Image (cartoon, rainbow, N blue to C red):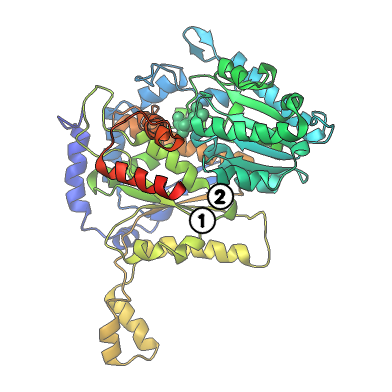
Amino acid sequence: MFGRTKSKAWRKLESLYKHSNDVHMRDLFAEDEARGRHYTQQLENMLVDYSKNRVDDKIMAALFELARERGVAEKIEAMFSGKKINKTENRAVLHIALRNRSNKPIYVDGRDVMPQINATLEKIKDFSESVRLGRFVGHTGKKLTNIVNIGIGGSDLGPYMVTEALRHYWAKDINCYFISNIDGTSCAEVLNNIDPETTLFIVASKTFTTIETLTNARTCRKWLTDTLGEHAVAKHFVALSTNKEEVEKFGINPNNMFEFWDFVGGRYSMWSAIGLIIAIAVGYNNFERMLEGAFAMDQHFATADFEHNIPVILALIGIWYNNFYNVHRYGVIPYDQYLQYLPAYLQQLDMESNGKTVTLDNQFVDYATGPVLFGGAGTNVQHSFFQLLHQGTEMVPVDFIIPAISHNEIGNHHQILLANVLAQGEALMSGKTEDEAAAELEKAGKSKAEIARLKKYKSFSGNRPSNTIILRKVDPYSLGMLIAMYEHKVYVQGVIWNINSFDQFGVELGKKLALNILPEFEGDAFGVEHDSSTTNLINYVKQIRK
Ligand code: G6Q
């Protein structure tokens, strides 16, 4: 166990870090002409180049040793075989079963989970096809062409990100909308633009108790029934949930419910019922292609040795910066407009999974766990936060993601995009010395005095790490692979940190906290004590709202 008593590999990495800190990646590339190929892995049409990292063979070997020491292989096997690895909630963690295209049985408490998973997939297939073909129509007989997903967190971010990422595949007559925030604006801006007769609401909530989702769903229900009457609900509302009782209480017929199970965590749930809007938008075949892509990554993750295992390698490189360089942040920059919501989705996946302080042995950690993740679509973000990435005092490891082929090959747009992403990685890695900056200024005809004044500003330290992930195209299959890759990366890191990546008590706290203050604004507060700042703020807002 490391932490209180550090493991052998951990200590080795600490000592390697002391030496590696003085090494510039430029020199590593100069020493090994084949470094680019040497530190690249390919799985089908996905290529991952991790050569622009501050690692060498010794460091990678020690990282693999750490993974072995921490029992990563056993923990992968435990997940795939349905063991209850979510210890704090005593649950199996089986998003991999949702896309288990081999259909090999996976047992939880002695029962194969595949039949129920297949039944839900079958139901998704039938329903999504019926909606797309206009067989399942609205109360007044009109085709349902506005699909509104009402959900939040794991019941929103995955389907939202994927639906947007696969916009190219949408049926031409279907529009998708997402209502997540409790802010009335979220409802109003969608409802103002759609017609109840052609709208299908999908209420997505694992627990079916989340205040935001239920409040939004009630508002939408009222909006619908005010025009079409109570009987219309059966044709315009479906539920995705694990909680049949609450679904019925809300007034949705259980026949219109798509079931999932407690072995599927919210942020890992878009591969089944929670993905219904994806299947309606892009068609079940494409949804299935996404499952197949994820399954290909699952197989790779479960069987490849660590030295060739993409999620394991990415996880270990993350650990290297997080725990040895003490760099607790990283950026994900997709160079693809369709992937613009990927960073927001990954923020939840990574930060909710690994933002933990207590180990599986019930001890407080004495090392850093999950980093802060941020990002945005390139090239846009080159014009916002990239200045800091290049010249700030903070080192920020980055994942660049780009498809080799765009869905929209217009003029030379995609060539420019490709050139940008590769140039950024190269510049972050190599930097520019003061001498090089001076030579450039001289070439531009600057005076000696000007060169002396400007060369520091125009120099770049470089040695700033990045991974480059190239997909052939942003298609359902590649997207499935990409998402599964990050899911597994996060899991491996959680295993190494000896934490439970599958609970989220911090989120649950948030769900309860607001309920203490809500009565103050609804006028029936009963003397709950708050700190003086909160009391002042409550009074200030009340005064304005009077
Ligand atoms: C995800 C979290 C959380 C959850 C939302 C919505 O892993 O548990 O983001 O998805 O809080 O919860 P419900 O789906 O139960 O409404």
Name the kind of residue labelled 1 in the image.
Ala
Residue situated in front as seen by the camera: 274 or 284: 274
Is the residue indicated by label 1 positioned so its CB lies within 8 Å of ligand 1? no
Q: Residue furthest front?
A: 546
Instruction: Give the image location of residue 361, x and y in percent.
Output: 24, 22
Which residue is situated farthest in the right direction here? 141
Residue position marked by numbered label 1 in the rendering: 377
Residue 56, position in %: x, y?
30, 49
| Residue 529: quarter of image | top left
Disc 1/disc 2 C-alpha distance (Å): 7 Å
Please, is residue 503 above or below residue 473 in the view?
Answer: above
Residue 366 is drawn in which quadrant? top left
Q: Check mark 2 vs ligand 1: CB closer than 8 Å? yes or no.
A: no
How many other residues sit within 10 Å of disc 1, few (<14), some (14-19) or many (≥20)? many
- Is residue 311 among the parts visible in the rendering? no
Please indicate whether residue 172 sits to the left or right of residue 526 in the image: right
Secondary element under disc 1, as helix, strand or loop, is: loop
* 423 in relation to 109, above or below: below
Q: Is residue 147 left or right of residue 262?
A: right
Looking at the image, residue 514 sits to the left or right of residue 13; the answer is: right
Q: Tag 2 or tag 1, which sits nearer the N-term? A: 2
Relative image position of residue 483 (x, y in whole percent)? 51, 39
Proximity of marks 1 and 2: CB atoms separated by less than 8 Å: yes
Q: Residues within 10 Å of mark 2 (few under 14, many from 20)?
A: many
Looking at the image, which residue is at 66% across and 17% down?
A: 254
Residue beneath disc 2 = 339
Q: How many marks?
A: 2
Horizontal placement of 316 versus 347: left or right?
Answer: left
Label 2 element class: helix
Q: Residue at x 34, y 20 (%)?
A: 88
Asked whether 273 or 31 is in front, the reply is 273
Q: Is residue 256 visible?
A: yes
